[in-house]
Amino acid sequence: MTAEQIVFLIVALVTLGSAFMVVTTRNLIHAALWLVATLFGVAVVYALLNAGFLAVVQVVVYIGAIAILFIFAVMLTRKDARDSGPQTHKNWWVGALLAVASYLGLSALVLGWSGSSKAAAGLPSGFDAVGQLGEALTSPNAYVLPFEVASVLLLAALVGAVYVAFNRK
Amino acid sequence: MDWTFWLEWVLKGFVLCLVLLTGFAYLTYYERRALARMQNRIGPNRAGPQGLLQPIADAVKLFFKEELTPARAYKIVFFLAPIVTVVPSLIIAAVIPWGTSFQLFGRTITLYVADINVGVLYLMSIASIAVYGIVLAGWSSNNKYAMLGGMRSSAQMISYELALGLSFVTAILLANSMRMIDIVNAQSSWWFVVIQPVGALIFWIATLAEVNRAPFDMPEAEQELTAGYHAEYSGMKFALFFMAEYQKMIVICAILATLFFGGYLGPFVDKFWFLGPVYMFAKVFILLFFMIWVRATWPRIRYDRLMSFGWKVLVPLALAVVFITATGILLAQELNNQLYFWAIPFVSIVAAGIAVMMIYRELRRKAYERA
Amino acid sequence: MLLEYIAIAVMIAVATLIAFIAIGLGELLGPKKKSEAKSMPYESGMNPYGEGTRRMPVRFYLVAVLFILFDIEVVFFLPWAIVFRQLGIFGLIEMIIFIVILLVGYVYAWKKGALEWE
């Protein structure tokens, strides 16, 4: 095993462990904090994969914005921020079945792919990952349409949030 | 990868932390002396010559203060919140270049900890993590005032983060790179503050709000708001919040110097490597003086006005500045005429002037309605 | 490239260590005289009443939503800002369309009073 693999295993274990804590802990704020740990673990995995831009964006958007939104949302709900009552739904086995099925399906897909057993080729020196990403996002023969549609999605989210918050008076 | 790499990283990280800690201690002294001068007083002058040992005396005193944890606090988070606040304020400095490089024992030692190709985005990500310490401190204290103060401060920080991010974009547009070293080198002929003064100003205002400095210092509004998120903290934990604020001041001035004031560049810096940190120190010192000056001059702004200013003035203005910069650069490139490039500062200043006029008219209208 | 991130990780470790040492020294050296009055929540000297944490106004939530949207917009700006010289006027127009769509929502929020704090 190389050092990189060991680091990956540790990070993966921490990520999964905190993901488990998110669903089991009773205190909602603690759950949000464990979620932050999970998201941070994913960011480290991105950094291990040489995707520096994605790693940092993961921190900016998911930890810096979305998890903050969760915490604000918890704070405006109940005064105790503590969950009581059963933690499993009566249909929990359907969810478990679906999770196992999708896990098996994904593993079958990955194992069937010839590239999964090969080590990734190193990036050529001087490779400008962020520049390539910018070109892919905005050049007309790549992903410009999804890029513009993303702003419509953001608009819908914004209008929805304002409507829900202000039209119930 | 051999052990000398690790040694270099640990030493660099340690030295940088140490520099920031010393900087924090002496910044408090600098601020107290400068404020005192502006208010026609003398300031601390008892401990040591000219009061130079005052920060050390303060630190020793703080170590001997009692650490209180309120009975109803959420203990673990209450303990972690100051750490979560102070760690980002230290590690954000990792990507700032303090100079070029020098030779030591046949190795090239660079004067930065990390040179990642998304340096500016790294700054943004650490700035957004800094919100956690504050919101968690407010929540875990289990105290009405602390909670409200924490929410207020964090809402203020995330609101001004947008304008901050957009002013980063203007610097990236001008430098055509997110790497801090490239941004510094792109300023070898003109500092970016000359080309985009409004961008630098927006950065300045947004960061004042980001570190809760005057005139946006809600957490220090003791008379009207019972301090803020750190109302329940005492001893070293309180000192850590205080430390984080002052370290962020230093780091922000260093970032401003790097992005808009030419970083470590200066005369003869390519001949003598040690001039880089010297120039950087001089620039940070001067910029810090402006921060202190602002505190001595402006009264605290009301919270509703603070939020309105962030959302209704700074965000649109920063967007306009980004597009003015991009358009100017593109027109100069496509039409091959440098005149368009030099129109950027003037058009930006006009945009800022329009924003100021609109604020003025709005305030006049409100005053008229009240009367 | 990965090396640079390891350097940052080392720095995080050093910074955390410093924070723990500071708090540890404070706990070690400071006096420990607990009393009931001291560990009460601070409410300017009055006896505290009610819960410490209570429901927050919905405005904070709205600010967070607005922040996410514009934060994502800023993140989209960054890769564009690096290559916009190659893309030319076309890239600029694209970005303007992107922003104008978002600005529609911004104006809606403004008109609805989501940005007012009075």
Image (cartoon, coloured by chain):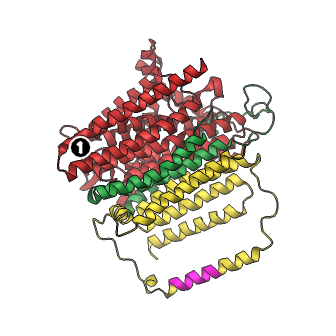
Chain colours: A yellow, B red, C green
Residue B82 occupies which quadrant of the picture?
top right
Quadrant in the picture for the N terminus of chain B: bottom left
Res C114 seen here? no
Q: Nearer the viewer, residue B169 or B191?
A: B169
Q: Which residue is mark 1?
A: B341
Res C50 seen here? yes
Drawn side of residue B222 relative to residue B276, left or right: right
Residue B305 x/y as whole percent: 55, 30
Sort mark 1 into few (<14), some (14-19) or many (20+) by Cα contacts within 10 Å.
many
Please check the rendered image and state whether residue A107 is part of the magenta-colored stretch, yes or no: yes
Residue B168 x/y as whole percent: 38, 46
Drawn side of residue B305 relative to residue B42, left or right: right
The residue at the point 56 percent across, 24 percent down is B366
Quadrant in the picture for the C terminus of chain B: top right
- SS state under label 1: helix
Residue bounds of the magenta highlight: A101-110
The residue at the point 34 percent across, 70 percent down is A141
The residue at the point 52 percent across, 44 percent down is C107
Please check the rendered image and state whether residue A156 is part of the magenta-colored stretch, yes or no: no
- Give the chain letter at badge 1: B
Amino acid under disc 1: Phe
Drawn side of residue B175 relative to residue A99, left or right: left
| A63 vs C36: above or below | below
Residue A26 x/y as whole percent: 75, 57
Secondary structure mostly taken by the magenta-highlighted segment of the chain: helix
